[in-house]
Amino acid sequence: MVTTSYRPAEDTILTAKKISGTLTARFSERRKRPIYQIRETEQDDVLVVGKERFELYHSDGEKFFFHPNSAMFRAKRLLKGETDPFVEAAQLTPGDKVIDCTLGLASDAIIASLAVGKEGTVCGVEKSPLLAFLVETGLQAWETDLSALNQAMKRIRVTSGDNLEYLRRLEDDSADVVYFDPMFDEGIAASDGIAPLRKLAHADFNLSGCVEEALRVARKRVVLKDHWKSPRFEACGFDVKRRKTALFHYGVLELEQTQG
């Protein structure tokens, strides 16, 4: 259900009601109630609409809100002329068209948007309607002290839906790079900060079917990020770019190789 911040302005209330309609969720007046009380009364997750950001409180008390996460320090390195493992694996260049089929918190989509620049495009596909909504609004509203990063976030187009169905609707060779970053089967301690994301994201999807469609859609390459132990690299024929000490690797399918 949807409610507002503790002392909402009138426009915040109107925004919350509009969002409840968009998400087909119930709206409940805050009436200065603490969030734990609302959760107990409503027996549901609570989306709190504030002036500056939206926060989702799960029924178990965990809180989720959009933030650039690791994209912040990665962007700073990229803007200094340093390398980024994802940009290197995908070989992103200005003007590229990128499809991120597993958007999540959009960390990689943000870096992709920064790398491809104003002439390029980045579209993120997210199966969870609520997660897609939170990330899309966050990308438009979040402000950092880096103008280039703010612009890169605002350029990302977010689509809510199944990634396989989305790819099937696209024409041949309509993107340069198609990217997948599924939930790891193996847990990574460093990822505990995004633990609430696992409750929103849809971890199950047909990777082999998606890869088949991605090879039709992509002009240059298809990229998979996964845990270093993952069997999905070999199962789908990816050339793995192994990184010493890293707990996840990137797998690449070059179109010249797959079509030759």
Image (cartoon, rainbow, N blue to C red):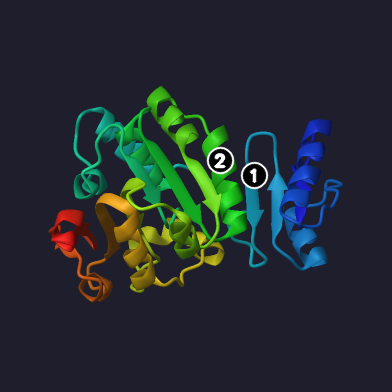
Total numbered badges shown on the rendered structure: 2
In which image quadrant can residue 71 be found?
top left
Which amino acid, by three-letter code, is at mark 2? Gly
In which image quadrant can residue 25 be found?
bottom right
86 relative to 51, above or below: below
Residue contact at pointers 2 and 1, CB within 8 angstroms? yes
Q: Which residue is drawn at 69% across and 62% down?
A: 45
Residue 205 visible, this orientation: yes
Q: In this view, does 159 lie to the left or right of 41?
A: left
Q: In this view, does 259 lie to the left or right of 136?
A: left
Q: Residue at x 26, y 48 (%)?
A: 86
Residue located beneath label 1 in the image: 54
Give SS at disc 2. helix
Q: Earlier in the sequence, mark 2 or mark 1?
A: 1
Residue 247 place in picture, x, y as percent: 24, 63
Distance (Cα) linking label 2 and label 1: 8 Å
Residue 27 place in picture, x, y as percent: 82, 52
Q: Residue at x 24, y 44 (%)?
A: 87
Residue 47 place in picture, x, y as percent: 69, 52
Which amino acid, by three-letter code, is at mark 1? Phe
Residue 18 place in picture, x, y as percent: 78, 43
Q: Residue at x 36, y 73 (%)?
A: 185
Residue located beneath label 2 in the image: 138
